[in-house]
Image (spheres, rainbow, N blue to C red):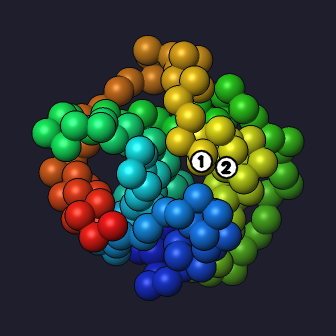
Amino acid sequence: MIPFPEGLVEGVFEPICRKYDLKVARISDWQVVLTSPRYALYFYTEPNEDTISLRYLDIPDCPASIITTYNLGIFLALKRPVAPRSKMSLATEEMRTHAGLKLLFDHLRTRAEDVLKGEKDWLKDYEPTWSVYPVEREVEAAIRAVLREK
């Protein structure tokens, strides 16, 4: 994958951002976070990898508390799968990145409305083997900055 081109994540996720009042923060060319007061969706890709990862960041009510990070991509794939799509042959890495983001958008919109609303009952079905991560410092700083702006 290539870095997220400027405006690509914002463009693909604009309907979700508008509907659920999510604010976009670009952490780096490889990392973007969509933030609400209760949670954030953290999209990232690694150089030399052909996937986009998605984590759910649970933002506690107390600003001094630790933000917990869950692998939302695995949860959606295993607990709320969508019908498989045929493989597309896309000419450029930018087209593949756009297609990957569009697939995540469609999956969230159709199978995770409760997550987007900020509901947390889905966490009861989160498997402990999928790991719970501490949030990276730069990601937390970006989220806290967006929350201060509200």
The residue most toward the bottom is: 6
Quarter holding residue 3: bottom left
Q: Residue at x 42, y 46 (%)?
A: 39
Q: Above or below — where is 67 with respect to 131? A: below
| Dot label at residue 32 | none
Q: Above or below — where is 115 with respect to 46? A: above
Side of 132 where 117 appears, left or right? right
- Give percent across and percent down for residue 98: 62, 73
> Rounded to the nearest whole Å, what is the CA distance between mark 1 and mark 2?
8 Å
Quarter holding residue 63: top left
Q: Residue at x 23, y 64 (%)?
A: 148
For mark 1, what is the residue? 116
Type of the residue with mark 2? Leu
- Give percent across and percent down for residue 55: 44, 44
Mark 1 nearby-residue class (10 Å; few <14, some 14–19, many ≥20):
many
- Give percent across and percent down for residue 47: 37, 63
Q: Which residue is drawn at 57% across and 66% down?
A: 17
Q: Can residue 143 be seen in this view?
A: yes
Q: Above or below — where is 78 with respect to 14? A: above
Quarter holding residue 119: top right
Secondary-structure class at tag 2: helix
Mark 2 nearby-residue class (10 Å; few <14, some 14–19, many ≥20):
many
Q: Earlier in the sequence, mark 1 or mark 2?
A: 2
Q: Who is closer to the viewer here, 86 or 72? A: 72
Type of the residue with mark 1? Leu
Q: Quadrant of the C terminus?
A: bottom left
Q: Who is closer to the viewer here, 130 or 16? A: 16
| Dot label at residue 108 | 2
Secondary-structure class at tag 1: helix
Q: Residue at x 35, y 27 (%)?
A: 132
Q: Marks 1 and 2: CB-CB under 8 Å?
A: yes
